[in-house]
Image (cartoon, helix red, strand yellow):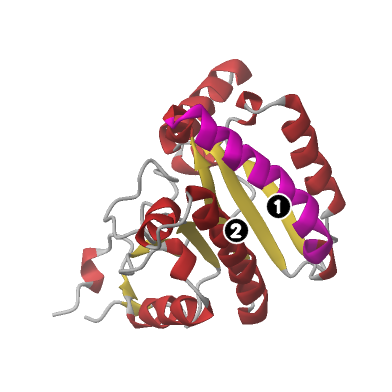
Amino acid sequence: MEGHQAETLPQHVAIIMDGNNRWATERNLPGVAGHKKGVERAREAVEFAVEKGLSTLTLFAFSSENWGRSSEEVNLLMKLLNTALREEVPNLVKNSVQLSFIGNLSQFDQSLIDQMKKSEELTYCDPDSKKLDLVVAASYGGRWDIVDAINKIQESASNEIITEEIFSSYLSTSEFKDPDLCIRTGNELRVSNFLLWQLAYSELYFPDILWPDFDDNQFEIALDEYSKRIRRFGDKSNFQQ
């Protein structure tokens, strides 16, 4: 019996934006040039997602492991994130894109935390007018997310049996549907501690390209690849002979 053909378009796309430094190195440019180009591609990806009618776009901007990079690079990334928030919020508001952050945000400087909260408030949309949920994972790790959910469950002192649905409601992504498609650039074939619970049945796509080269055409190719997939969600009865 044939499996279920994937929807023509995924509702939720998650992207691991990897390869900024290598892109800059290949062009004998400073690392900041790669990260700035990466921010441009992120902006284009959001606009493309709105144009295509996706419901949710999650971008992995800064992992919990990224704190281990040099202080110079971390400071640069923080400045870029702060600048991007100030510059991009007006466009998000104009396009009815609601911004949300997930991750251990307490690790950031208070000024950046305040900027994140302000950006979330400014981009809040009425559900009837919202065109896209943009979720930015910052200081995020999939293992952290799971452990944080367990701690919240313990703090709730609930005696109910924990089901998958209940557990999911304690994750940082509880407001959103699990990703249908996860794209990882950078020529690496792993999810790097990203949305470990949520990606259980997501389609994975690994284009042979660095993030600063991931344009609308590449996004379109990824969506086309997704449309060809057959999603079984672990149901052996749907195995295609």
Q: Name the residue under label 1.
A: 84
* Quadrant where the image shows the N terminus: bottom left
**Residue 218 has which mark?**
none
Q: Kindly report the distance in space between the C-alpha atoms of the residues bearing marks 1 and 2.
A: 7 Å
Residue 128 lies within the magenta run: no
Secondary structure, mark 2, is: helix
Q: In this view, does 119 lie to the left or right of 200?
A: right
Look at the numbered discs 1 and 2 and tell me whether their residues touch, using CB distance below 8 Å: yes
SS majority, magenta: helix
* Residue 213 in the image, given as x and y percentages of width and height: 45, 70
Would residue 161 be visible to someone looking at this image?
no
Secondary structure, mark 1, is: helix
Q: Mark 2 points at which residue?
A: 39
Q: Nearer the viewer, residue 142 or 95?
A: 95
The structure residue drawn at horizontal position 29% and vertical position 51%, both measured from the top left corner, is 190
The structure residue drawn at horizontal position 54% and vertical position 18%, both measured from the top left corner, is 154
Identify residue type, mark 2: Val
Q: In this view, does 14 lie above or below 157?
A: below
Residue 89 lies within the magenta run: yes
Dot 1 or dot 2, earlier in sequence: 2
The structure residue drawn at horizontal position 46% and vertical position 26%, both measured from the top left corner, is 147
